[in-house]
């Protein structure tokens, strides 16, 4: 290890962190440089100058959240081909979204196109674009919902979610499975459900079918629409 270089890098990290604490309005403007130096500390073991492990070093320098440090390193690891000044102009939230795409595409990553998209988009718009890139589906906003369950209720709830996950596929979230259970309940209470609620249930259930069967249902619906015209 080049101790002189190690000391300079560690000192620069401390300088950036102190600068961030003093300038709240300009915080995170040096995140690209900070990520670069953290990667060097990890790669060459500079953390040995005063710490037992890299994790211990991060815990000392990022007491609020080590996750952010890993985000910054991910940005540097996957967007090294983009000038740091351009990355820092975006902000680290946008840069992190680009890093996800770059990690997935590897050498095929079109940095110019994605950088332009990030510059022209809000944080939310870029997040939705990246979500669609990975899933092929439009982004749907969500809310975190919390409620209390007694221990005696847990087995019933867990069993219902398990059965729903078997129907929907193991890759589905527990929130999706809970919606499926509720939709099934509404379907069995037709007299108390509105047409919109019943239609939502049908739509969700149809999406669980293989694509072949979904296409068959669509073809049958089109056939029913054509029947009156053919009789005329």
Image (cartoon, rainbow, N blue to C red):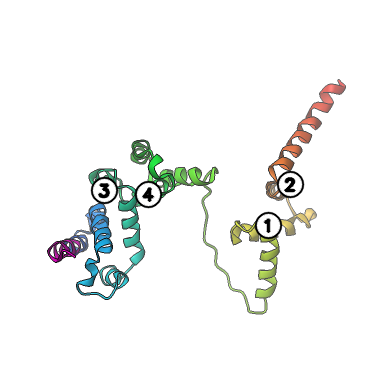
Tell me how far mark 1 sits from mark 4, CA to CA: 34 Å
Mark nearest the camera among 2 and 4 is 4
Q: Give the residue at mark 1.
A: 180
Q: Which numbered disc, 4 or 3, marks the residue that appears first in the sequence?
A: 3
- Pointer 1 with pointer 4, Cβ within 8 A: no
- CA neighbours of label 3 inside 10 A, class few (<14), some (14 to 19), many (20+): some
- Pointer 2 with pointer 1, Cβ within 8 A: no
Tell me how far mark 3 sits from mark 2, CA to CA: 50 Å
Q: Position of residue 60 (x, y in %)?
A: 26, 72
Which residue is found at the position 36% from the left and 63% from the top?
67
- CA neighbours of label 4 inside 10 A, class few (<14), some (14 to 19), many (20+): many
Mark nearest the camera among 3 and 1 is 3
Tell me how far mark 2 sits from mark 4, CA to CA: 44 Å
- Pointer 3 with pointer 1, Cβ within 8 A: no
Q: Give the residue at mark 3.
A: 88
Q: Main secondary structure of the magenta part?
A: helix
Which residue is found at the position 76% from the left and 39% from the top?
217
Image: 13 above or below 97: below
- CA neighbours of label 2 inside 10 A, class few (<14), some (14 to 19), many (20+): few
Q: Position of residue 173 (x, y in %)?
A: 59, 59
Image: 53 above or below 137: below
Magenta residues, start to end: 1-13
- CA neighbours of label 1 inside 10 A, class few (<14), some (14 to 19), many (20+): many
In the image, 223 versus 49, the foreground residue is 49
Q: Give the residue at mark 2.
A: 195
Image: 55 above or below 32: below
């Amino acid at each position: 290890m080049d101790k002189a270089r190690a000391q300079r890098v560690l000192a620069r990290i401390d300088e950036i962190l102190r600068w961030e604490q003093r300038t709240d309005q300009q915080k995170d403007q040096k995140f690209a440089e900070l990520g670069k130096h953290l990667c060097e500390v990890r790669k060459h073991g500079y953390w040995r100058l005063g710490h037992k492990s890299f994790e211990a070093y991060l815990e000392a320098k990022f007491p609020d959240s080590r996750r952010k440090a890993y985000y910054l390193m991910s940005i540097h690891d996957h967007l090294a081909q983009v000038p740091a000044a351009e990355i820092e102009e975006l902000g680290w939230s946008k840069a992190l979204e680009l890093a996800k795409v770059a990690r997935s595409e590897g050498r095929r990553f079109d940095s110019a196109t994605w950088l332009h998209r990030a510059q022209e988009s809000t944080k939310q718009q870029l997040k939705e674009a990246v979500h669609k890139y990975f899933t092929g589906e439009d982004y749907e906003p969500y809310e975190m919902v919390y409620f209390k369950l007694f221990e005696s209720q847990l087995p019933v709830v867990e069993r219902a979610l398990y059965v729903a996950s078997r129907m929907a596929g193991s890759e589905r979230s527990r929130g999706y499975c809970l919606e499926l259970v509720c939709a099934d309940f509404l379907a069995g209470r037709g007299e108390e459900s509105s047409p919109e609620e019943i239609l939502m249930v049908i739509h969700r259930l149809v999406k669980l079918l293989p694509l072949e069967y979904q296409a068959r249902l669509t073809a049958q619906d089109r056939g029913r629409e054509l029947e009156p015209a053919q009789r005329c």
